[in-house]
Image (cartoon, rainbow, N blue to C red):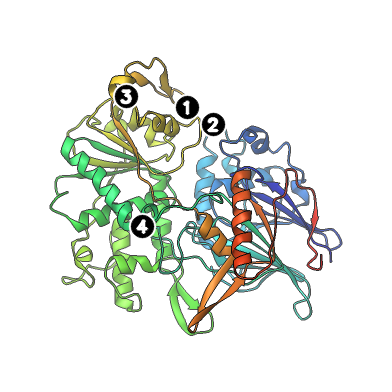
């Protein structure tokens, strides 16, 4: 058998994940991810599907690592152009992808329609999400999933081919890797990643391959302190703290943190109002609540562990992760944070710390839309809204009015692509109002009948709440490739592979990650070959002997 790989994207880019693999002698032709490009110079051509090097009719299946649209966003276009195969992923990725793709189909610049989304045949190997199991997808062709810690449902995927009784070859795709590690988790909900078994080849993302975050940025205590300071400013001015956030993962993390801050000092925030203006996030909340309740056996040790609920939730709330009653209580508090009533009554004397005891549901949901809400009403209040880059959704209705008042603050929660409204607001952050009055252009939303606001009239403070990134930095990416497992009084090193392809990042980030991998490998007396395929990569034969 001769397996080949072609990196269709992204090479020298961050969005538009798509890798093509084939074995012509076996008739195998399949993709790992098929995502939209977002904010890239080639986005229009790629997203139209006219420059794909493959014929969708000949693709047998797709392995999907997670539900972000830069990984799954063009799967409906595959079906529209003749693909009839299966999309293999976790249950949670299926549910989120159906939701996000359905929402994308409603946007004016999307080439596919809702009917194309409804044609997708998602399938979770084994019928339910399991990690590490071998799942056959063809004769002598198998896949394995390992949690990647990025967002709910996200996995690294290992592909194995050959006779299991003799000699198999394997390649592992990192997918997008989340920050932190076991017992050093960063995000409020994400459970730590799992290190896949070593493979003959590895493909690793490099979004932040040239950057290592300072500890104060990744420390949850500091992150919540920054959030509390923004809430305190709204309490002082009586205005609105507007928090635009991505509907998937980011909004859920922000909601948990706000509940944590309030429960830490309920009297301080007793006069504050809390609004969730994100219909899409409401649906993601429902999926998240269901997923956080899931548990399963872990390996052969007879242990039953949560699939997605991280240990940090138990630490934050002073709960015992091994106590079933504490697990139920932790899940109920998560449900309250995500705007869902608890399934079971909260005990009069709940377990956990003082924060657990003071926890209460805070948010009311903006059902009618901000046009029916008195935007100028007296605060103080917090409004969490979509979209994260401020270009669409409720942000279009809320921000034009909120930006006019110096009592208000817009706190961005993550990366905003060049040209987005969020990016333009970030540019204004250091500019005082007296200087903004000299501006003569408008802030315009590129939506049908989208509003326009003279930039000179923007008086609200603009800030960024750092610490919510769902991507690993350089040190964490290197740790995925070369990991040290504690063993007795020392440790042992394991490698994802001796042959590593670096994609999903700008060339500077890819180069920085390659150098960091080589440095760590050398320090441990290991040999690793790293490659940075160019675009287009052409076919590369996966021969372990080479």
Q: Nearer the viewer, mark 4 or mark 1?
A: 4
Name the N-terminal-most of marks 3 and 1: 1
Neighbours of disc 1 within 10 Å: few (<14), some (14-19), many (20+): some
- Residue 315, given in percent of the width and then of the height, sits at 31, 68
- Asked if disc 1 and disc 2 are in contact, CB closer than 8 Å, the reply is yes
Residue at point 52% right, 44% down?
Answer: 102
Name the N-terminal-most of marks 3 and 2: 2
Q: Nearer the viewer, mark 4 or mark 2?
A: 4
Name the N-terminal-most of marks 4 and 3: 4
Q: Nearer the viewer, mark 3 or mark 1?
A: 3
Q: CA distance from mark 4 to mark 2?
A: 39 Å
Q: CA distance from mark 3 to mark 1?
A: 20 Å
Q: Is residue 167 left or right of residue 301?
A: right
Name the N-terminal-most of marks 4 and 2: 2
- The residue beneath circle 3 is 458
Quadrant location, the N terminus: bottom right
Q: Nearer the viewer, mark 4 or mark 3?
A: 4
Q: CA distance from mark 1 to mark 2?
A: 8 Å
- Residue 201, given in percent of the width and then of the height, sits at 70, 64
- Residue 357, given in percent of the width and then of the height, sits at 19, 65
Quadrant location, the C terminus: bottom right
Q: Nearer the viewer, mark 3 or mark 2?
A: 3
Q: Secondary structure at mark 3?
A: loop
Determine whether 300 is above or below 348 in the image: below
Name the N-terminal-most of marks 4 and 1: 4
For residue 108, the mark is 2
- The residue beneath circle 1 is 447
Q: 405 and 438: which one is in front?
A: 438
- Residue 37, given in percent of the width and then of the height, sits at 60, 40
Q: CA distance from mark 4 to mark 3?
A: 32 Å
- The residue beneath circle 4 is 219
The answer to whether residue 274 shows anywhere in this view is no
């Amino acid at each position: 058998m001769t397996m080949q790989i072609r990196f269709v994207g992204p090479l020298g880019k961050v969005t538009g994940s798509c890798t093509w693999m084939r074995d012509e002698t076996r008739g195998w032709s399949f993709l790992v991810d098929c995502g939209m490009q977002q904010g890239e110079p080639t986005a229009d051509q790629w997203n139209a599907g006219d420059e794909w090097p493959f014929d969708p009719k000949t693709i047998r299946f797709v392995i999907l690592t997670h539900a972000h649209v830069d990984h799954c966003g063009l799967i409906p276009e595959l079906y529209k152009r003749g693909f009839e195969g299966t999309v293999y992923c976790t249950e949670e990725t299926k549910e989120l992808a159906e939701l996000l793709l359905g929402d994308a189909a409603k946007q004016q610049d999307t080439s596919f329609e809702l009917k194309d989304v409804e044609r997708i045949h998602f399938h979770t190997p084994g019928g339910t999400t399991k990690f590490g199991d071998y799942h056959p997808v063809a004769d002598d062709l198998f896949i394995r999933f390992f949690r990647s810690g990025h967002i709910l449902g996200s996995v690294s995927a290992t592909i194995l081919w050959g006779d299991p009784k003799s000699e198999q070859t394997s390649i592992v795709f990192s997918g997008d890797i989340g920050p932190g590690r076991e017992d050093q988790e960063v995000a409020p909900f994400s459970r730590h990643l799992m290190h896949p078994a070593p493979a003959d080849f590895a493909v690793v993302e490099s979004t932040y391959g040239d950057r290592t975050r300072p500890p104060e940025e990744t420390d949850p205590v500091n992150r919540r302190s920054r959030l509390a300071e923004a809430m305190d400013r709204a309490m002082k001015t009586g205005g609105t703290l507007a928090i635009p956030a991505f509907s998937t993962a980011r909004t859920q993390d922000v909601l948990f943190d706000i509940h944590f801050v309030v429960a830490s000092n309920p009297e301080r925030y007793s006069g504050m109002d809390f609004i969730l203006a994100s219909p899409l996030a409401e649906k993601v909340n429902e999926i998240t609540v269901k997923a956080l309740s899931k548990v399963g056996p872990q390996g052969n040790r007879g242990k039953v562990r949560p699939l997605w609920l991280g240990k940090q939730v138990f630490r934050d709330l002073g709960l015992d992760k091994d106590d079933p009653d504490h697990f139920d209580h932790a899940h109920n508090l998560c449900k309250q944070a995500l705007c869902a009533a608890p399934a079971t009554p909260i005990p009069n004397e709940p377990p956990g710390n003082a924060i657990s005891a003071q926890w209460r549901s805070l948010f009311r949901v903006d059902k009618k839309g901000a046009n029916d809400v008195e935007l100028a009403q007296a605060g103080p209040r917090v409004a969490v809204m979509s979209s994260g880059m401020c270009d669409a959704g409720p942000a279009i209705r809320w921000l034009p009015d909120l930006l006019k008042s110096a009592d208000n603050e817009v706190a961005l929660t993550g990366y905003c692509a060049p040209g987005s409204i969020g990016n333009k607001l970030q540019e204004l952050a250091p500019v005082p109002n007296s200087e903004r009055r000299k501006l003569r252009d408008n802030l315009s939303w590129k939506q049908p009948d989208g509003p326009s606001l003279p930039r000179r009239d923007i008086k609200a403070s603009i800030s960024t709440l750092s610490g919510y990134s769902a991507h690993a930095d350089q040190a964490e990416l290197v740790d995925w490739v070369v990991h040290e497992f504690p063993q007795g009084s020392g440790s042992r090193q394991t490698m994802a592979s001796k042959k590593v392809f670096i994609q999903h990042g700008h060339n500077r980030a890819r180069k920085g990650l390659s150098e960091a991998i080589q440095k760590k490998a050398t320090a441990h007396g290991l040999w690793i070959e790293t490659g940075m395929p160019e675009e287009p990569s052409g076919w590369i034969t996966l021969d372990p002997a080479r």
